[in-house]
Every structure is written in structure tokens, then in C-alpha cells.
Image: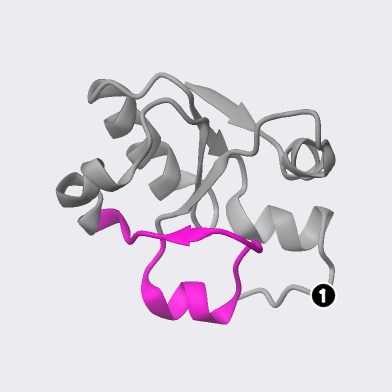
Amino acid sequence: MQNISAPELAAWLADESRARPVLLDVREPWEFQACHIPDSVPMPMHTVPARLQDLDRDAPIVCICHHGGRSMSVASFLERNGFDQVINLAGGVHAWALQVDGSMPTY
């Protein structure tokens, strides 16, 4: 599985020549409400196995959580289930807030 840093993801999202990834936020609903990267898709970690059919196997998927642990587990699960363009956001939304969007609340 690949990892991507917050600044690398920001550059990817700003690059209109690249296919936009699915930003899969696997945190709990209260966490997503507190803060999230724009256009992220909320899918709490425990719901992912039952919702695999909701994900595009052909699209790049960046898994996101608070610090990167839960998203790494989900990314690994997705890879084991046939998804081959899965990337973990190293440091999660916390890294995004510190390195990309200083206006994003942290918790």
C-alpha cells in the first residue's frame, strides 16, 4: 500500500490533469462533522465491509482518518478485497490541518 503526505495530496487535488481520487474518510460521524477535507466521502470504518459495492474499484481511493492508523487498516482491507489503487493519507486530517489548511479545526 502506498502512503501520501498531506502536501502531496493537496498538490494532486490541485492538478486538474490528474484523475481526482475518492477521498474516503473512515472516521466516526462526529469526527467528520468536526472537520474534513472538502469533497470527502464519509464511510465510518465499521461500515466499509458492508459498503464495498459503493466504492469504484477502478478509481484511486485515498483513505483518511484522524492520524492515519484506521485509514491504513481500511486501505489494507480494500487491497485484500481487490482494490488496487488504494493510498493512505499519512498523518490523517491532523496532518492536513497542520500542513495544508491552517483554518481546519483540530481535535
**Residue plotted at (65% across, 60% down):** 94
**Residue plotted at (49% across, 72% down):** 32
Q: Which residues are magenta?
A: 27-46
Drawn side of residue 15 relative to residue 67, left or right: right
The residue closer to the viewer here, 15 or 73, is 15
Q: Which residue is tagged 1?
A: 103
Seen in the picture, residue 54 relative to 84 is either above or below; the reply is below
Q: Quadrant of the C terminus?
A: bottom right
The percent coordinates of residue 42 (x first, y second) are 42, 63
Q: Badge 1 local density, few (<14 within 10 Å), some, or many (20+)?
A: few
The percent coordinates of residue 66 (x first, y second) are 52, 59
Seen in the picture, residue 104 relative to 58 is either above or below; the reply is below
Drawn side of residue 7 relative to residue 4, left or right: right
Q: Quadrant of residue 52?
A: top left
**Residue plotted at (84% across, 68% down):** 102
The residue closer to the viewer here, 68 or 15, is 15
The percent coordinates of residue 25 (x first, y second) are 47, 56
The residue closer to the viewer here, 35 or 70, is 35
Q: Quadrant of residue 11?
A: top right
Q: Indicate yes or no whether the magenta region holds residue 18.
A: no
Q: Indicate yes or no whether the magenta region holds residue 29.
A: yes
Seen in the picture, residue 30 relative to 95 is either above or below; the reply is below
Drawn side of residue 68 relative to residue 104, left or right: left
**Residue plotted at (49% across, 55% down):** 65
The percent coordinates of residue 51 (x first, y second) are 22, 50
Q: How many marks?
A: 1
In this view, the residue farthest toward the left is 50
Drawn side of residue 38 relative to residue 34, left or right: right
Q: How is the image coloured?
A: one colour
Amino acid at pointer 1 = Ser
Q: Secondary structure at mark 1?
A: loop
Seen in the picture, residue 70 relative to 9 is either above or below; the reply is below
